[in-house]
Image: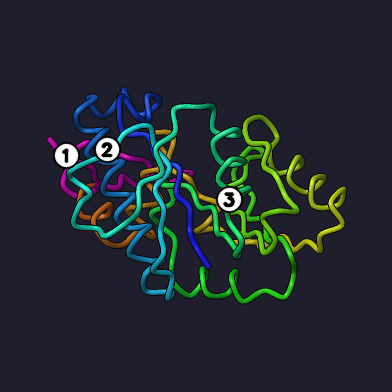
Amino acid sequence: MRALIPYKKENAKSRLSPILTRMEREQFVELMLRDVVCSLREAGLNDIDILTTSEYGSLAGLNVNFVIDSNDLNESINKYLEKIDQPVLIIMADLPLARPEQVKSIISSKEDVVIVPGKGGGTNVLFVKNPSKFHVRYYGMSFCNHCAIAKDMHQSLKIYDSFLLSTDIDEPHDIVEILLHGHGLSLEYAKEKFELESGRARVKLASIQ
């Protein structure tokens, strides 16, 4: 069994630019990736591939494999799936709330395909037991796309409902969830820069002065 993590560092997470500089965002995404890798390892997944456009020396100590591909995300992942003859867990790098017990639950499912939906119709985690009988179609309503692909390919399907795994960090208000539910390096980083501010309706994010 392998895990695949698509990863982009250069000018990453542009929607966080109102609260973090480019350098800070690039540092933050690496810390989130490290938290994801840590959760995978604690769940027993040691064969971890990072899908990216270039190899990063700062990640050398993680003992991961780099899959270098400059093509579109869908093309890159589908090329990867064509070459793999074992189950694959595809998990996004911006899921620092992931926990080992959730990963264990997903990879122990009896279904052929397990999908963790993200906000707004995305796909945050995709577990595929038979890579040769599946292909991905990210962007847009990828959750619906992947459900349809599983059906068309006659693969049994499970929708895994998880608040923590459905919370990808894209917008400034998403960092609230790290401060409330996070762990590891990403939580330490968020606590250095932000604090929670109690509003009348919802908790808000405030910069530490």
Q: Earlier in the sequence, mark 3 or mark 1?
A: 3
Give the amino acid type for the residue marked by disc 1 in the picture: Ile
Marks 2/3: CA distance? 46 Å
Percent of width and height locating residue 52: 39, 37
Residue in the picture at 81% in, 63% down: 156
Task: Tell which tag, 3 or 1, sits nearer the viewer.
Answer: 3
Give the amino acid type for the residue marked by disc 3 in the picture: Lys
- Secondary structure under tag 1 reads loop
The answer to whether marks 3 and 1 mark residues whose Cβ atoms lie closer than 8 Å is no
Marks 3/1: CA distance? 47 Å
Residue 208: mark: 1
Horizontally, is 203 left or right of 105 in the view? Answer: left
Give the amino acid type for the residue marked by disc 2 in the picture: Ala
Residue in the picture at 30% in, 27% down: 10
Q: Check disc 3: other Cα within 10 Å, few if <14, some if 14-19, many if 20+.
A: few
The one of 74 and 108 positioned closer to us in this rendering: 74
Vertical comparison of 12 with 42: above or below: above
Q: Where is mark 2, residue-wise? A: 206
Vertical comparison of 60 with 209: above or below: below
The one of 77 and 21 positioned closer to us in this rendering: 77
Task: Tell which tag, 2 or 3, sits nearer the viewer.
Answer: 3
Residue in the picture at 37% in, 30% down: 13
Percent of width and height locating residue 77: 56, 41
Q: Where is mark 3, residue-wise? A: 83
Vertical comparison of 148 with 38: above or below: above
The magenta span reads: 190-209
Q: Earlier in the sequence, mark 2 or mark 3?
A: 3
- Secondary structure under tag 3 reads helix
Q: How is the image coloured?
A: rainbow
**Residue pushed farthest left?**
209
The answer to whether marks 1 and 2 mark residues whose Cβ atoms lie closer than 8 Å is yes
Percent of width and height locating residue 139: 62, 31
